[in-house]
Image: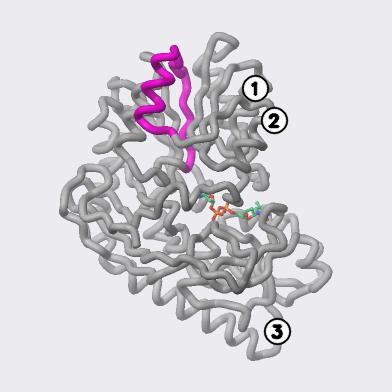
Amino acid sequence: MNPAVVSCRSCEGAALEVFLDLGTTPLADRLVEDRDAEEPTFPLEVAFCTDCSLVQILETVPPSVLFQEDYPYYSSFSPALLRHTRENVAALITERRLGPDSLVLEPASNDGYLLANYVEAGIPVLGIDPAEGPASEAQRKGVRTINTFLTRDLAQSLQDDGVSADVIHANNVLAHVADTNGFVAALEILLADDGIVVIEVPYVRELINNCEFDTIYHEHLCYFSVTSLSHLFERHGLRIRDLREVSIHGGSLRLFVGRGGLQGDRVRSALQSEFNHGLQEFSFYRNFQEDVERLRDELVALLTSLKGAGHSIAAYGASAKGSTLLNYTGIGLDLLDFVVDRNTHKQGKFMPGQHIPIHGPEHVLSHRPDFLLLLAWNFAEEIMTQQAEYKELGGRFIVPVPSPAIV
Ligand code: DWN
């Protein structure tokens, strides 16, 4: 068993208060190939640091276990994510006047979904990703990628070799690193003096307000507010200069971080708003367990009622969040016949814990379930548009979050 953290992953204080226990669960992205094989499970408890406001899980599963060779998440299977990324990159190329003498670096570059946009514009890039499959895919696309984790030591070695990035993208990675301070220190080492780090993280305010408990799994060690991020970056001589709220992944923050400089109006306003809403107080998180239990009971009751009335139910999106939702609620093969997903690396495997089979999206029309539970609810619009024929034939969708609803 891995040692649970007893001190905050950011400020290293001991003031951690647990407010959510999702039980002991399998790894959300460890899809099952052999249903008889033993599945490792780990506790999933969430705590709030009353010193620096960081929300975090207590368990640290070794990154080498989480992001191993068959890590199945490939960003390029989500068209909405690709559009979101393309728009962000185009704006940055213009604003930062990037060109052939620039360098854009991305830790957790996955399958090159983001950096490929810079390569297309003739701008030099360097990706860093520990997952062999996605990293190999990126290299096939012509995205220069180092297949490893970004650490403080690697950053120092790259800096010694002259690497200095004008833009660093860090999308959905800051929450994933076991050495939070070491990772931020690595960003500071690799950032050019007038460079900018563009960081995207799911916003913990949305997680709590919309009961997005299924976005909690062992890959996500931290859940950020602007308040907790500000403490973290200031500790390393970095400052949040500007920010945007973006809708991706159920509501995220896009932060623009540089060496010192002015904390812009949007940042000050966000910090004040968080203070007014109490995100720096334990009381903001205190009732979340009850909210999650209520959502669980409502969702199980809805699916049980539909099944009891003779309806068939399947699910769309073999997502990591889907694993948390199924394993915490206990929704399994008694209620769901199958899951579909566009990601070909996931097809033919089974959902962790519940061992529900994963097929391609064509299975929806060939098997015509009466209802489709959207385990990738963050892409609901895109998926429902894509499944227009299923809907025309009378198929209905169930959105589980923020509260179960048939749409
Ligand atoms: O941090 C992470 C988040 C950002 O993405 C990673 N650790 C893992 C991953 O979490 P997730 O699996 O919950 O994320 P997604 O992107 O919500 O998963 C969506 C799933 O749905 C993917 O497997 C792709 C699939 N999909 C599909 O089959 N058809 C997605 C779309 C948009 C579609 O049209």
Percent across and percent down for residue 381 are: 65, 55
Question: How much space separates mark 2 and mark 1, taking CA atoms?
Answer: 9 Å
Question: How much space separates mark 2 and mark 3, taking CA atoms?
Answer: 44 Å
Identify the residue at horizontal 53%, vertical 23% (top origin).
92
Q: Quadrant of the C terminus?
A: bottom right
Tell me the residue that label 1 is attached to.
119
Question: How much space separates mark 1 and mark 3, taking CA atoms?
Answer: 49 Å
SS category of the residue bearing label 3: loop
Question: Quarter of the image holding residue 281?
Answer: bottom left
- Residue 62, magenta (yes or no): no
Question: CB atoms at circles 2 and 1 under 8 Å apart?
Answer: yes
Q: Which residues are magenta?
A: 150-172
Q: Label 3 is placed on what type of residue?
A: His
Q: Few, some or many C-alpha atoms within 10 Å of disc 3 (few <14, some 14-19, many ≥20)?
A: some
Whether residue 309 is visible here, answered yes or no, is: yes
Tell me the residue that label 3 is attached to.
311
SS category of the residue bearing label 2: loop
Percent across and percent down for residue 329 are: 48, 75
- Residue 169, magenta (yes or no): yes
Tell me the residue that label 2 is attached to.
141
Identify the residue at horizontal 33%, vertical 70% (top origin).
289
Q: Label 1 is placed on what type of residue?
A: Val
